[in-house]
Image (spheres, coloured by chain):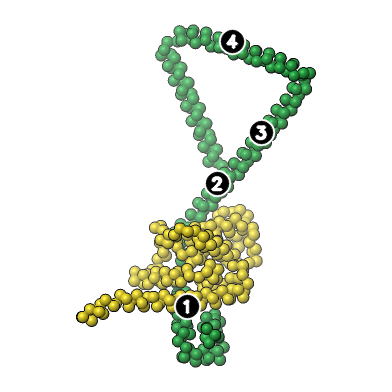
Chain colours: A yellow, B green
Amino acid sequence: MNDNEAIWLASARAGDDEAFTYIVEAYQKPVFSLCYRMLGNAGDAEDAAQEAFLRAYKNLNRYDPERSFATWLLSIASHYCIDQLRKRRLTTFSIDDEQHDWWQPPDPGPSPEIRLVNDEKQAQVQQLLDTLPQKDRAAMILHYWYDHSYEEIAESLSLSVSAVKSRLYRARRALAEQYQTMDAQMLESQNTERTPYEKTPAF
Amino acid sequence: MKKHQPFETWILLDEPLAPEQAQLLNAHLKTCEACHALRAAWGRVDAMLQETPTLEPAPGFVTRWQAQLSQQRSLQRYARQRWQSWITLILIANAVSAFAVLLGWQVFNSFSSLTEILILLVQRATTFITVVNVFQNLFAVAFRTLPGLLPPAGWAVVAALISIGSLIWVISLSRLARMRWRTQ
C-alpha cells in the first residue's frame, strides 16, 4: 500500500466519500477481473465488483491497517462471488451467459486476428475455471492473477495454509484433466468434420 | 493410480524439484504415456493462465459506484425516516390513549352515579341537536337571501377567485414539500 492509499483510507474512514472514490478507481480493475473470473460473465462481474466496494466501504472501520488492503478487499470480493455461485447453484432456471451490450472487453491494441485469438484464449480459460469448485477457483485466481502467497490466500478465503496447498494441487489436476478432455473432444469433432470429404471419391 | 505417484504430484507441484527428483521424473515420463500427457496438458493450461491478462470493467465504473452509493444512502435515509415516523405515531397513540383513560377516569369519578352520567349525556346531546338546528335555519335563510345580493356574473367571479386561491395554495404546498425533499 502506498502513502496516497493510506491517506485515502484514513480520510474514507473519517467519512470522506471522495477519498474512497480514489480507492475504487485504483482497485476497479483487479476487483472486476477477480469477479469476472469467478462468475464468468461481465454483467454479474460488474454487479459483484460494485457490491464488493460497497461492502468494503461500509465495513471500513473493521479493516486493520496493519494488513494489506488489497488482500482484504479481494477477500470481500471472493466471498461475495462464492456466495453468488452457491445461490446460482440453488436456482433452477438457466443463467444468461451472454455479455451485456454495454460491456466491451478491454481493447488489447493489436490487430483483429490477435484479438480473436486472445478472446478465444479468454473463453477457454473461463471454460476451464468454470469446472472448478468455488473455493478452488478463488484460490487459483488469487494465486495466478494476483500473485497471492499461500498465506494471503488462506487469509482471504478463511482456510488453513495446508488446505490452500491441497486445493491448488487438486485444482491444477482438475484443470489439466479437463484440458485433456476438451482437447480430445476438439480432435474428435475435427475428425468428424473431415470424414464426409474423405469418403468422397476425389479423396 | 499408485504407479503414477509421486510423479503426478511432482508434475502438478508449484515448487521446483530437487535434481534427483527431476531426473527420476524425466525417466518416468519417457515410459509413461499418461504422465507425459498430464504434464503436457498442465504445461498448456499453466501457460494459458500466465498469458491471459487482467480484465477491465466498462468505462464509468467509478461513476456507477458513486450513483449506487448515493442510491443506497437514500434508501437507508428513507427507511430511517419511516422507522422514525412509526415510532412517533406509536408514541402519540400511546399518549392519546393514556390521556383518554385518565380523562375518562376523572369524569367517571366526578359523578356519584351512572344515572347522573346518563342524564348529562342526554342534556349534552339535546344541546348539540339544538345548535345544529339553529345553524341549519341560519344557512337556510342565507341560501334564500344571498343569491339576490349578487348577480350571477358576480358569483362566477367569486367562484373563480376561490378556485385560483385554492390552486395557488396547492402549488405552493407541493413546491415547498419538493424543496424539503431535495434538501434532505
| Marked residue chain, label 3 | B
Q: Which mark is residue B112?
A: none
CA distance for labels 1 and 2? 49 Å
Q: Residue at x 42, y 10 (%)?
A: B151
Residues at discs 4 and 1 both on one chain: no
Closer to the eye: label 1 or 2: 1
Contact between labelled residues 2 and 4, with CB atoms less than 8 Å apart: no
Q: Which mark is residue B93?
A: 3
The residue that disc 2 covers is B74
Position above or below: A8 against B41 = above
CA distance for labels 4 and 3? 35 Å
Quarter of image, res A41: bottom left
Residue A173 lies left or right of residue A113; in this view the side is right
Q: At label 4, which amino acid type do we have?
A: Val
Position above or below: B151 against A104 = above
A70 and B30: which is toward the camera = B30
Q: Residue at x 61, y 67 (%)?
A: A158
